[in-house]
Image (cartoon, coloured by chain):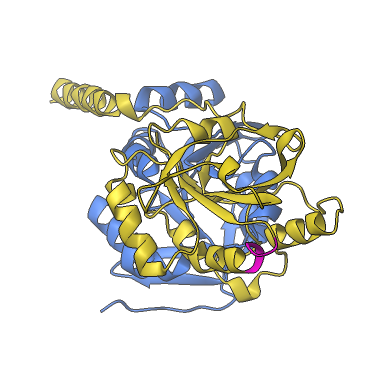
Chain colours: A yellow, B blue
């Protein structure tokens, strides 16, 4: 009986391990941007089927690049606040550019078609781009959604000025008393240094 | 039929094996339904679980039901929990599910998967203040795991297979 038990356990472990092989993921985003780096431009497909690049925005002073997606409850919790950011800062020269970095094979609800549906439901006022092939997010070093990069347009390109969370309360916008992104852009608009340049947040791991 | 038991300021007395330490942890509340009980902590009260010095090795796994790679590796944590004596190894699954999804998502998940490891809910929305206290290298993405015993601690921002997890555990035993 004991041998049988051991055998069953061994088979179980092997089965479980075999099942897990494709789940191993190696952290390959350590090489992402730090404050002061110049961020790469991109050409990604928007939910209106046009291609969008940062260089298209001739008038912009910078960008609020947000890696976000459909499936993640933390992203969903921030959707209204992302719309609000776009509303408040697009006219001041800092539009929101949202990018879905997930591979729809890992998360079917993050497919391009589902992005269109979600954007329509929520009335997104900003481009919601699909990182086809998951090539852009590793360059930025985004590890999760939502993950914000504020870029300032300079003569030397789009310089990273802030990396992190939108604010300090994912549950309740009204209870957030540190609005990192808002504060950062207001500082940039005044030509000042961003007060808090990096923050950390819980988010949904990006799956390539 | 979910029945909520709502103990505000319920004090859980944790007495270590050696009986040397007595520490009171305040839960903000306890979710309870269908035989599942999940204590809820803010970080200040949760932090104690990261530094219990009683000779036991602890595996602390940060996860959530919405996190696919987390859910995929949960069976390995469960297997470790069942295969190693509780005197030597304790697995603590720290859920980061949003509190409003505990009843609709977390409790049904725990019941369906028949999770036996200890589960707590970490509910502290000011994540920027506590993520670096868990580990200064943690970006905040999950799954993330700590394996510690006494003052020796290893942190992993990654997924595990069973073999990998056991290998890391054995380093600590």
Residue at point 50%, 59% (across, down) = A126
- Above or below, B147 against A129 in this view is above
Q: Position of residue A113 (x, y in %)?
A: 28, 51
- Above or below, B12 against B136 in this view is below
Q: Position of residue A160 (x, y in %)?
A: 71, 40
Q: Position of residue B31 (x, y in %)?
A: 42, 70
Residue at point 65%, 65% (across, down) = A91
Residue at point 44%, 40% (across, down) = A44
Magenta-colored segment: predominant secondary structure: loop
Assign the N terminus of chain A to one quadrant of the image: top left
Instruction: Compare residues A57 and B60 and report the one nearer the observer.
Output: A57
Residue at point 56%, 30% (across, down) = A139
Magenta range: A88-92
Assign the C terminus of chain A to one quadrant of the image: top left
Q: Position of residue A191 (x, y in %)?
A: 86, 53
Check residue B46 for magenta coloring: no
Where, by quadrant of the figure, is residue B46 drawn? Answer: bottom right
Check residue A89 for magenta coloring: yes
In the drawing, does residue A119 fall left or right of residue A113?
A: right
Where, by quadrant of the figure, is residue A168 drawn? Answer: bottom right
Q: Residue furthest right?
A: A192
């Amino acid at each position: 009986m004991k041998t049988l038990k051991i055998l069953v356990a061994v088979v179980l472990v092997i089965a479980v391990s075999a099942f897990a092989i494709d789940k191993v993921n190696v952290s390959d985003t350590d090489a992402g941007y730090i404050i002061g780096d110049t961020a790469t431009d991109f050409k990604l497909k928007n939910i209106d089927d046009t291609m969008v690049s940062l260089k298209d925005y001739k008038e912009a002073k910078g960008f609020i690049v947000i890696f976000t997606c459909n499936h993640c409850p933390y992203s969903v919790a921030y959707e209204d606040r992302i719309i609000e950011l776009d509303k408040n800062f697009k006219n001041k020269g800092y539009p929101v550019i949202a990018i879905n970095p997930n591979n729809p094979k890992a998360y079917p609800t993050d497919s391009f078609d589902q992005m269109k549906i979600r954007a329509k439901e929520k009335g997104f006022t900003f481009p919601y781009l699909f990182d086809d092939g998951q090539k852009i997010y590793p360059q930025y070093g985004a590890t999760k959604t939502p993950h914000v990069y504020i870029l300032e347009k300079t003569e030397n390109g789009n310089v990273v000025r802030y990396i992190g969370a939108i604010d300090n309360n994912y549950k309740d916008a009204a209870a957030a008393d540190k609005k990192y992104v808002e504060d950062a852009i207001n500082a940039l608009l005044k030509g000042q240094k961003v007060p808090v340049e990096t923050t950390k947040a819980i988010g949904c791991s990006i799956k390539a | 039929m979910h029945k909520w038991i709502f103990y505000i300021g319920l004090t859980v007395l944790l007495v270590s094996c050696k009986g040397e330490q007595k520490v009171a942890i305040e839960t903000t509340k306890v979710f309870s339904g269908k035989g599942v009980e999940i204590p809820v902590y803010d970080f200040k009260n949760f932090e104690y679980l990261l530094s219990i010095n009683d000779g036991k090795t602890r595996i602390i796994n940060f996860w959530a039901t919405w996190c696919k790679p987390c859910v995929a590796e949960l069976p390995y944590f469960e297997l470790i929990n069942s295969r190693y004596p509780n005197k030597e190894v304790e697995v603590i699954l720290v859920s980061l599910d949003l509190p409003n999804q505990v009843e609709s998502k977390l409790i049904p998940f725990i019941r369906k998967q028949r999770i036996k490891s200890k589960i707590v809910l970490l509910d502290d929305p000011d994540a920027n203040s506590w993520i670096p206290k868990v580990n200064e290298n943690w970006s905040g993405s999950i799954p993330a795991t700590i394996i510690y015993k006494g003052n020796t601690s290893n942190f992993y921002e990654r997924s595990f297979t069973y073999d990998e997890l056991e290998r890391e555990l054995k380093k600590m035993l």
